[in-house]
Amino acid sequence: MVSAVLVGLFVATPFLQSARDQAVGLAAPFYKFADLPRDIAEWSRTRLISRDELIQKNEALRSELLVHQRKLQQLAFLTAENTRLRQLLNSADNLNHRVLVADLVGVAPDPNIHKVFINRGSDDGVYVGQPVVDATGLIGQVVNVSSNDSVVLLISDTSHAIPVQINRNGVRLIAEGRGSVFELGLRHVPSTLDIKEGDLLVSSGLGDIYPAGYPVATVQKITYDPGRPFAEVVAIPKAQLNRNRHVLLVFANKTRFSSGDQTFSAPPKAMLKEPNSDNP
Amino acid sequence: MTTHSGFYTWVVVSVLLALLLCVYPLPAHYAWFRPEFLPLLCVFWALYCPFRFGVVIAWGIGLAQDIVVGGVWGAHAIALAFITYVCLLSYQRLRSYSLAQQILWVFILVGIHQIFVNWVYGLDGYDAPVEMIILPTLITALCWPLVLTLLKPSRGVWHI
């Protein structure tokens, strides 16, 4: 009976939201403790390393840096050009978002539930509905925040859908989670729509959760079934949903960020500025 | 009195350990093979300490699991409370069974548990395919001898 009431409150009302936020703080220690062996392994991998190996790695990183610096030179030029063109179009240049690096401390054990725990909470300025990205694409949004930890709902969760658009022609669609970290489904795609395998889907910025322009998925397979009203489209998420250790929390909504400015107390080195998203 | 508090300490410790195993990170492909240790614990305590372990404690344990795994609150609570109730009704019969028969019974009890959990999760929009309900149930039932070997000596310690 009590269970029934609890389940009802949980599923149908936002009544338990604050209790759920508190519970994140209770649950996080279990994940951190269960993750200890991994942490130890990682620590030993980074500390117990031979000098030769370090020198070799250093050289490799140096050459990689050189390559990236060359690319960056071009990027500066492209950014300037992009800004000029945007000014020509009279649109605000709002692609520079502040981000905060967070570590993943745990993954919800039930394979149906695609949620992860990260080690940043309301003390760091994290808020419910905040978009989370990694180096390659969108991961999801924050759903519960305690003071030091928060829970992120992945875009592949069955209860999640995200407004996207095809990068090639700007057609707007909805990408929904299918309960697998390797695929998203596109909802209501007309059979006559101009969509091809390999098309990049980026967030469209509709829905006020995710900022526009972050890569979400690439179209993998399109099945046209004349017996059905819509085409069946499967897309692969760009972000590596099942193998991330570090994620980026995006402070996308500037008004929201400035209103919560006084609570923002993250160490400055954790902040970094992302020059641009992957796409022009 | 001391033995009682000792018993409950032991229950709490075993539940904490089981919760750790619950969230221990597994590769995505093996996540379906994770045994559910908490139903096994509840079945064990209900069968072998039926006068001290009851439905309310089982409900609390289930709620703790719900909070830790981040699912729907009340799902594991109602499932554990139900199978504990079944065990309390039939502990005399179940205790006299052979190990193989007990494993079969545990399979059925854990299956009921899984059905309850998935039913509640279904209310929140999550649905697991049937074979993915049966597989963890089977593995959990096969872990029953392990739980017996680990926990039965504790009965002597607390004079249960």
Image (spheres, coloured by chain):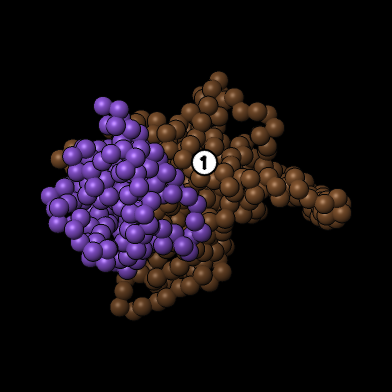
Residue with the most extreme bottom position: A226
- From the viewer's side, name the closer residue of A128 and B117: B117
Q: Any idea which chain is the purple one in this picture? A: B
- From the viewer's side, name the closer residue of A181 and A164: A181
Q: Is residue B51 above or below residue A192?
A: above
Q: Quadrant of the N terminus of chain A?
A: top left
Residue at (66, 34) in percent of width and height: A270
Residue with the most extreme left position: B89
Residue B143 place in picture, x, y as percent:
36, 59
Residue B40 place in picture, x, y as percent:
31, 52
Res A30 seen here: yes
Q: Which residue is under mark 1?
A: A33
In the displayed structure image, the side of residue A88 where residue A60 appears, left or right: right
Q: Is residue B152 above or below residue B134?
A: above
Residue at (27, 63) in percent of width and height: B99
Residue A209 place in picture, x, y as percent:
46, 42
In the displayed structure image, the side of residue A254 where residue B8 appears, left or right: left
Q: Amino acid at mark 1?
A: Phe
In the displayed structure image, the side of residue A33 where residue A86 appears, left or right: right
Report in which chain the residue with disc 1 lies: A
Rate crowding at label 1 as few (under 14), some (14 to 19) or many (20 or more) other CA atoms within 10 Å.
some
Disc 1 secondary structure class = helix
Residue at (36, 54) in percent of width and height: B149
- From the viewer's side, name the closer residue of B55 and B77: B55
Res A70 seen here: no
Residue at (40, 61) in percent of width and height: B32
**In this structure image, what is the colour of chain A?**
brown
In the displayed structure image, the side of residue B30 where residue B87 appears, left or right: left
Q: How many marks?
A: 1
Residue A45 place in picture, x, y as percent:
71, 50
